[in-house]
């Protein structure tokens, strides 16, 4: 049996120092942090758009039309630039997010309550009630959502209530 020669260990370790985990890994470990960041980035500006929006989202400034965003060489007056009519895009996004948030919150609440009630009825009564509810769910799942939305918008008209429904 051959014996391998012993190598001397250096006095200073050559292995790289322990690195901190990446931001994505740290956020996966702490889901509350991700929720708070999303809340701060999306919901807070939408809720406080009247106070935080830098410009009026409807007012046109023709002289400032098609200003590029800051990261493409624009000015800090319009962080996200302006559209063809000179309206501030950041202000329009902040105010427009209100509608999206309200539609999504109402839709989630209505869907959650309706699904819970129907599930409780189907589970409690079983038999005929369960079969009827399941057939109704099958029918709604078989209909194309976009076609149903178009028919509803044509029949009822366009409004936020129609979008929520």
Image (spheres, rainbow, N blue to C red):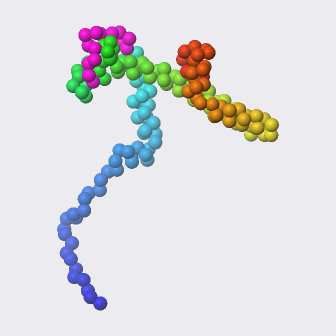
Q: Is residue 39 above or below residue 53?
A: below
- Where is residue 90 shown, x and y percent of the image? 35, 21
Which of 11/35 is in front?
A: 35
- Where is residue 93 shown, x and y percent of the image? 39, 21
Magenta span: helix, strand or loop, mainly?
loop
**Is residue 37 at least partly visible in the picture?**
yes
Say which residue appears at 59% left-offset and 30% top-offset.
144
Left or right: residue 59 versus residue 15 is right
Tell whether position 59 is magenta: yes
Left or right: residue 78 versus residue 106 is left
Left or right: residue 118 versus residue 125 is left
> Which quarter of the image is occupied by the C terminus?
top right
Specify the farthest residue to the bottom: 1
- Where is residue 50 shown, x and y percent of the image? 40, 15
Q: How many marks?
A: 0
The image quadrant that residue 23 belongs to is: top left
> Which quarter of the image is occupied by the N terminus?
bottom left
Left or right: residue 138 versus residue 164 is right
Say which residue appears at 57% left-offset and 13% top-offset.
157
- Where is residue 58 shown, x and y percent of the image? 38, 11
Say which residue appears at 43% left-offset and 47% top-offset.
29
Which of 126/3 is in front?
A: 126
Say which residue appears at 42% left-offset and 28% top-offset.
42
Q: Which residues are magenta?
A: 55-69
**Is residue 47 at least partly visible in the picture?**
no
Tell whether position 19 is magenta: no
């Amino acid at each position: 049996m051959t014996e391998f020669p012993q190598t001397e260990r250096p006095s200073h370790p050559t292995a790289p120092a322990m690195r901190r985990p990446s931001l994505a890994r740290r956020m996966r470990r702490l889901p509350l942090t991700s929720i708070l960041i999303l809340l701060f980035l999306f919901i807070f500006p939408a809720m406080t758009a009247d106070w935080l929006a830098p410009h009026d989202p409807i007012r046109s400034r023709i002289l400032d039309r098609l200003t590029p965003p800051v990261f493409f060489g624009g000015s800090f007056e319009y962080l996200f630039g302006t559209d063809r009519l000179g309206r501030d895009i950041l202000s329009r996004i902040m105010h427009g997010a209100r509608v999206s948030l309200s539609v999504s919150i109402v839709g989630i609440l209505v869907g959650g309550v309706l699904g819970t009630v129907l599930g409780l009825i189907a589970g409690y009564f079983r038999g005929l009630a369960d079969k009827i509810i399941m057939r109704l769910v099958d029918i709604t799942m078989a209909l194309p959502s976009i076609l149903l939305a178009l028919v509803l918008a044509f029949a009822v008209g366009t409004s936020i209530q129609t979008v929520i429904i």
